[in-house]
Amino acid sequence: MARDPGMWELLGRAASTARSEGPRELYRRSVPVYRRRRDRLCRRLLSRSGGIPAGRTYLRARRRVHPGSVTDADPFVRLWIDPDRIDRQVRTPSKRWGRVDGGDWDRDTVPFGETAAYSSVEAHFNRGVPWRETAEFEQYRDRFAAGEQPKGCATADELETRFQKLDAIYERIATDGYRSQPELWAERPDYQQDIFYKWDRTLDPRLDEITVSIGRDGAVLHGDRGDHRLAIARLLDLEEIPVLVRRRHARWQSIRDELSTATRRSALTNRARANLEHPDVRELHGFDPSNDGSGTATTVPSS
């Protein structure tokens, strides 16, 4: 992992940039550094003042005011899903928890196997390509040239050190299986805390899972987090991994709403019947997916 620069080091970099490239370039480079440190402070405050419980309270209140834009589902509860099922990535991932959005965002996708993250992980672990020679590293090299600090790294050496951490992650998953963030946090709290406060963009370290969105027809689409871990899980042919759902399409949310209130299978729409075994809704109802009859739910979900 790249070392987080201290205040004196940042001031030294700023002075060097001002002398060599002028105040305008110094300002341009300083803005993202300021934003990262501001956001990190906000994450610490959120985590220590409530974290996940505070997030749940906020989303419940927002759903009462804007029921059409916030899901009924707890966005902080994990779904365990076959990684091969997550075969596409949305181009415009949501950064917010519990979102319900209409529109065509779920159709604006790319095959996950064609992303720079997957192709780089596959090249490195299956064909022995050094990280510096992968497609993703080349993309970040271009960002260095533009004066950016991708993933908080100021140099290619720092970035390579961070990429090399994936080697240990791969070996750990191959040896011990895939573990959720709460499990990792319980085992190595100091290490996980260090990662969280440096890199994470969520309100609690236990939320640093692979994130997904669910499209109108139930397609599970990769979102904005955990692309390397998802790639590793697919390469290792794992049966299931934990994910967190950030966003659902409004048409898919309507299926959740239908199944959460239905008491007779005969009253379900064809779309709802076709998705009874979907991991996002199978806990909502008591209908037997193998029964085509018109029976009642064995248990009626509480609202």
Image (spheres, rainbow, N blue to C red):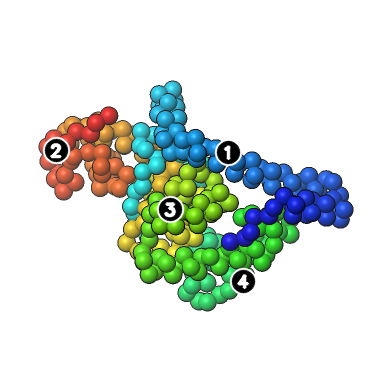
Counting residues from the N terminus, which is met first, the one under dot 4 or under dot 3? 4
Label ID, residue 12: none
**Which residue lies at the image location 64% right of the left edge and 41% below the top edge?**
38
Amino acid type at circle 2 is Thr
236 w.r.t. 17: above or below? below
Alpha carbon of mark 3 to alpha carbon of mark 1: how far?
Answer: 20 Å
Q: Residue beneath label 4, please? A: 133
Quarter of the picture holding the C terminus: top left
Residue 181: percent from the left, percent from the top?
42, 53
The crowding category of the residue bearing disc 3, from other C-alpha atoms within 10 Å (few below 14, some 14 to 19, many at least 20), is: some
Left or right, 86 with reference to 18: left
The residue type indicated by label 3 comes to Trp
Residue named by callout 1: 42
Say which of marks 4 and 1 sits in front. Answer: 1
Q: Mark 1, residues whose alpha carbon is within 10 Å: few (<14), some, or many (≥20)?
A: some
Considering only order in the chain, which callout, 1 or 4, is on the residue closer to the N terminus?
Answer: 1
* Residue at image mark 2: 298
Badge 4 amino acid: Glu
Which quadrant holds residue 131? bottom right
The residue under label 1 is which amino acid type?
Answer: Cys
Left or right of residue 124, residue 14 in this image? right
Q: Which residue is mark 3?
A: 185
Pointers 2 and 4 in contact (C-beta within 8 Å): no
The mark nearer the N terminus, 3 or 1, is 1
Judge left or right: residue 259 versus residue 190: left
